Image (spheres, rainbow, N blue to C red):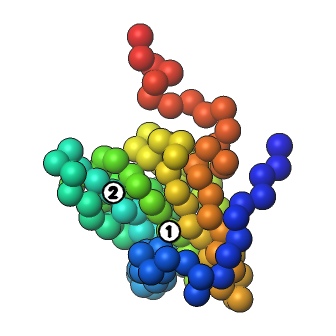
Amino acid sequence: MSFKPAITKFADLKSTDQELVSAAWVAAKAAHAPYSKFYVGSVIEAQNAEGAVRRFSGCNIENASYGGAICAERTAAVKAVSEGFTKFLRISIVCATKPGGSPCGICRQFLREFGGLELILISIQNEANDVCIWRLDDLLPDSFGPEALDF
């Protein structure tokens, strides 16, 4: 199955989406990526039970044991959840080293837990600032989620 995301220019995004992507660029500068040299930043906009909305940034943090590494998306997600913001609304992802791509499988599943299939993902795709916009269900079809465990 092949899905073609919506592609637009950064300049054509809504200002709130531009802010989300710009904040991810800032987050990428904090990445610790001495092995892959992929400096990734992510920002999640999330809501808590009271309806308050906040943004949480994250970067990838590599480790010499490799398995101890954490992606930018999960760094931002862990920060949000640990602060009580468990409903993810939107997420932006940028790779400062080589734009393009999408979240890895573990990140997709992790985002599924808190964002649901309607979560909007925004990612810079190239040096020309082309932006892809996905819904999580585009990247994770027929997914396994919390409702599958509802007995």
Q: At 37% from the left edge and 70% from the top edge, which residue is drawn?
A: 57
Q: Residue at x 50, y 31 (%)?
A: 145
Mark 1 or mark 2: whose residue is earlier in sequence: 2
Residue 42's x, y, as percent?
46, 69
Q: Relative to 52, is 24 above or below? A: below
Which three-letter amino acid code belongs to the residue tagged 1?
Ser
Judge left or right: residue 49 versus residue 113.
left
**Quadrant location, the C terminus:** top left
Question: What secondary structure is found at the residue carrying circle 2?
Answer: strand
Spot the residue most to the top: 151
Rendered image: mark on residue 44: none
Q: Is residue 99 visible?
A: no
Q: In which quadrant of the rendered image does the N terminus lie? A: top right
| Residue where numbered disc 2 is placed | 46
The residue to which callout 1 is attached is 92
Res. 9 image quadrant: bottom right
Q: In this view, does 115 lie above or below 20?
A: above
Q: Which amino acid does label 2 sit on?
A: Ala
Mark 2 crowd level (few <14, some 14–19, many ≥20, 10 Å Cα)? many
Question: What is the crowding at mark 1: few (fewer than 14 residues within 10 Å), some, or many (at least 20)?
Answer: many
